[in-house]
Image: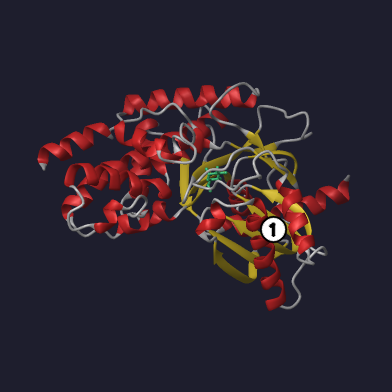
Amino acid sequence: MKKILKNIGRLFELKTADLLGIIDRFHQHMAAGLRGEKSSLKMLPAYVGLPSGTEKGRYLVCDMGGTNVRVMSVELSGNRRARVESAMRCPIPLPLRRGEKEALFSFLARVIGDFTSAWPRIPTPFAFTFSYPMEQKSINSGILIRWTKGFNVRGVEGKEVGMLISQSLKGARLSHIHLRALINDTVATLLYASYQNPAYDMAVILGTGTNACYPERKVNFQSTGRETIINLEWGNFSELPANDYDKLLDVNTPNPGEQRMEKMVSGMYLGELVRLVLLETQGSKGHPKLNKPYGLTARQLVRLEAEEIKAIAHPIVVRSARILAAAITAVITWMDSDLKNIHHVAVDGSLFTGYPGYRKIVEATVEELLPRQGDKLIISPVKSASGIGAAVACAMSDFAAKSF
Ligand code: GLC
């Protein structure tokens, strides 16, 4: 057992020097992505900047994540406070995740319809949080580039998602609901965090998938006319050393060769990596779950009892946290290379707070990468900001519409 553990430890180890190299490569990919050159970081403009905190109004939100869809009605106070008036959550059935476009979008419209008929006085300005890479040309339109997180719904890649959701609402006799904002979950998270506290200038999602965003101040996007938040799509970062388990996991996904960082870091894949390692080192004896792909979830990892299994999972989880720390450090030092300011980073993800020790490893790694300056980065957990943040985007689009 000792030998196995040593070997696994070595396979998943990332030393300080490796992480510093990764940060350099990250910066190169960010620069190339922003110039529109070939890069594993898509650096997608979101066509929205940071809020002022005075945004106000009532909005309807549909938040489609990797596992659930949540519909809610949100009230923004106009003075940095928000309230979820009512909400409903529904898991996305597995067949819909790999089925036809019509089935998925009519399901979404049905869930929204059920919600609006269950509650009185539902507002009609509408925001859709769509947590997949989109090429946007405005705050309420976007073309799906590629599905991620195991989704593979036919007929949506290359299509305008804003139009698809609006058409399905029309088909469900909900044409009074108007799409004002189409937004990635990272961007929504940053909007809500900075609506409450303007010190936030980065948001990270560490859930089923992983991704981040920040306001880009160096590059002026002509087409946006002002500062915009950039969705990095960092799950696709390609310059991390992959071992045989990473490669085995990757070839059996619907998107081999893509989302390589996500497949080493996020909740959806972490349990699977542990399963693959356990299966090879221990066999499946006594653990029927180990025979089933994706049979071990990140949530179950947290509750592992057997010491041996925990010991095998540990280096895999530590690698995830160290990669996350390096990626956060890369983005912050891109914005502020001398760390002149303090930066607040909002992290939404159950792994960050739920996995014992995860947050500590991230913080210790940041300290290791930025000796004596680690305290310039304040990384705090936020919960379910991707819904309320979409309402903030809606209010900002109202403002934009009124002022131009
Ligand atoms: C995946 C998606 C990305 C999303 C992230 C977190 O990486 O491609 O758009 O933000 O998951 O949900």
Q: Residue at x 29, y 60 (%)?
A: 303
Coordinates of residue 38 in the picture (x, y in percent): 59, 22
Q: Which residue is mark 1?
A: 391
Is residue 282 left or right of 324 when viewed as pictured? left
| Residue 374 seen from this side | no
Is residue 342 left or right of 401 when viewed as pictured? left
Q: Quadrant of residue 395?
A: bottom right
Q: Quadrant of residue 90?
A: bottom right
User: Which quadrant of the picture is home to ligand 1?
Assistant: top right
Coordinates of residue 7 in the picture (x, y in percent): 18, 34
Coordinates of residue 280 in the picture (x, y in percent): 22, 42
Q: Residue at x 64, y 55 (%)?
A: 389
**Scheme by which the image is coloured:** secondary structure
Q: Residue at x 83, y 64 (%)?
A: 176
The front one of 92 and 371 is: 92
Task: In the displayed orientation, state which residue is furthest to the left.
Answer: 2
